[in-house]
Image (cartoon, rainbow, N blue to C red):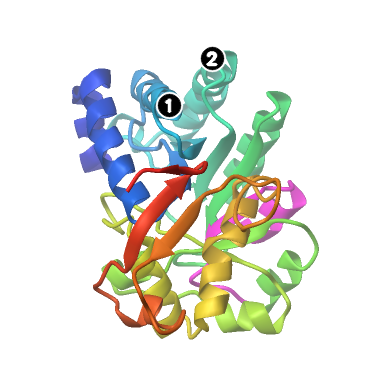
Amino acid sequence: IIFHAKKIQNISENELFEKSLERLNNVIKLGTGAIEIKSGYGLTLDSEIKMLKVIKRLKEASNATIKATFLGAHALPKEYKDNKEGYMKLIIEKMLPKVAEEKLADYVDIFCEKGYFTIEDTKRLLDSAKKYGLQGKTHVNQFNSIGGIKIAVKNKAVSVDHLEVINEQDIAELKKGSTIPVLLPGCSFFLGIEYAPAKKLLSNNIPFAIASDFNPGSCPTGNMNFIISLACNKLKLTPEQAINGATINGAYSMGLSGVSGSITRGKLANLLITKKIESLNELPYYIGDNLIDKVLIRGKEIL
């Protein structure tokens, strides 16, 4: 995160926009019709705002539905290595008001994990975000269970992302609210860490979304076909369960389930038309193939 933060700090807004638009168009061609894009690689006021402004420009330039998430609390920048309180104050007192004033974000996120931000930090940020009308999201339980799920559910966070490590108390907390887990099997694949226990969530009647976690450090792919393959092979889901997690549940995690995520009268016509296949099972089975023939976004053929 720190390595890429330096790159973001040194790149111009226009160059960042061009590179980001290219990546966005690539994932759209692979079948993504709606996407949440997080900041979190700036770690300074100017660079976080730069990232969010680029996301705003992407919203205007693309037919895909885009949600912006402010993730200033992703890691401690070098200059605040021994002063987390100082950085939290910068986020809450400087960054957050600026983000809200310029209407640059739909959500606020934080990495609640040992060595990063505590449950107290998480509560503080989510409470502050509420004052600006911004809903919360949290990165939790990637390496440790420290109570982040409980505080996220209590604060009515839209989603909790990662969940590679969960215990019975976490399961009990997830049953209490409408916060949806977002599982990221691509991250587990790339880092070689445990996969989220999707079957355990299913056995407890807890719905979840499946996402790519496309980022430079832990999952350098936005290919959702590959992510669905991982969900089947590593999370032990059926193709129907994996696709459900990546579509209607993914839409719910972005606050879009009323307009996207399923083929239903009144929703956006974001459609994938495959090449000739014998069954749905072939989509995750051919892990390295792109079986998409055409992509329609809002009813417009883009591929």
Please report the residue visible at 44 percent of the width from the left and 24 percent of the height from the top.
60
CB under 8 Å between callouts 1 and 2? yes
Q: Which mark is residue 52?
A: 1
Identify which amino acid the numbered label 2 is placed on.
Glu
Judged left or right of residue 224, residue 113 is right
Identify which amino acid the numbered label 1 is placed on.
Leu
Q: Quadrant of residue 283?
A: bottom left
In the rendered structure, does residue 182 fall within the stretch colored magenta?
Answer: no
> Cα distance, mark 1 to mark 2?
10 Å
Judged left or right of residue 168, residue 294 is left
- Label 1 element class: helix
Judged left or right of residue 7, residue 234 is right
Q: Residues within 10 Å of mark 1 (few under 14, many from 20)?
A: many
Q: From the viewer's perspective, is residue 52 above or below residue 142?
A: above
Q: From the viewer's perspective, is residue 201 above or below residue 33?
A: below
Q: Residues within 10 Å of mark 2 (few under 14, many from 20)?
A: few
Q: Position of residue 40 (x, y in %)?
A: 40, 37
Q: Nearer the viewer, residue 124 or 162?
A: 162
Q: Which mark is residue 23?
A: none
- Label 2 element class: loop
Please report the residue visible at 49 percent of the width from the left and 67 percent of the height from the top.
144
Q: Nearer the viewer, residue 6 or 210?
A: 210
Question: What span is in magenta?
Answer: 147-167
In the rendered structure, does residue 158 fall within the stretch colored magenta?
Answer: yes
Q: Pointer 2: what residue?
A: 102
